Amino acid sequence: MITGGGIRGSTMRGSDGIRYNQKHPGITLVCFGRIEHDLKDELLHSLSAFFDTLQEELPVRPVCSCRFEPDPEKIPAQNQETAYFPVLEIAGGNIILGVTNTGFYDPSLPRYIFSYGRFNGLGLLSTYRFRNETNTRRQYLERMGKQIIKTLAMACSLDACPDKGCVVSYHRYVDDLDHNRYVCESCRTEFIRSLKFFLDIPYGDASNLLQTEGE
């Protein structure tokens, strides 16, 4: 269940370099540490292309913006994501997605996780397994472009989809993303419902709800 929406922060700089007032709905990509520009560009392009497919259903097209932040000074040896979410919580935008090269090791599984999503519009993506388990740069960027949409879905409270061709499906291995070709109609409907919520309604407190990807 979603329990909040709205806009954090004051102004955002869009991927076109223009500063937008906080009243314009936005998706903020926060790049932590040494994120390469081609990866940043691929993630922004993937998000923008996805929103292009929803423009007839959404009341307004959100601005996709990007900001760079250093990795947190103190990152625990396990459950590393706990160091990143406080930074995302104060970033501007309706939905905030972080990306870092830091690996997210979950001792309860135990293995490294692809993404985390909180149901209050926050998502966090790790490049760690993609960098270590992908052979070519092109394939790496393609997989990351798909995983940022899955991370967006997790931040928007969508559950894993049973359709293995859908980007919102569950991914245990990095090559599972190679089977994804679309966002299915069911997930598209849920995306539209959730995005309308986050673009229009003030946030409540849903910070205790956490979803993981890559189990």
Image: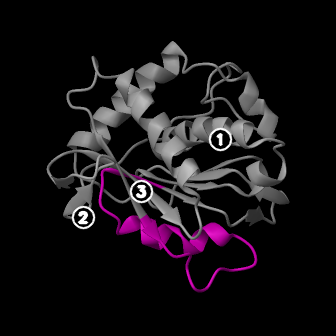
Q: Marks 2 and 3, Cα distance to the nearest angstrom? A: 18 Å
Q: Position of residue 46 (x, y in %)?
A: 49, 35
Name the residue that disc number 2 marks: 9
- Residue 205 visible in image: yes
Name the residue that disc number 1 marks: 141
Q: Position of residue 123 (x, y in %)?
A: 51, 53
Point 77% across, 47% down: residue: 215
Name the residue that disc number 3 marks: 206
| Left or right, residue 6 beside residue 149 | left
Q: Is residue 48 above or below residue 190?
A: below
Q: Is residue 144 above or below residue 179?
A: below
Q: Marks 3 and 1, Cα distance to the nearest angstrom? A: 31 Å
Point 77% across, 65% down: residue: 105
Query: Which numbered disc flags the more N-terminal residue, 1 or 2?
Result: 2
| Left or right, residue 176 beside residue 79 | right
Q: Tally the numbered discs.
A: 3
Task: Give the class, few, some or many, for how many residues have Cα within 10 Å of label 3's Cα (few <14, many ≥20).
Answer: some
Hey, what amino acid is under mark 1? Leu
Which residues are drawn in magenta? 68-97
Hey, what amino acid is under mark 2? Gly
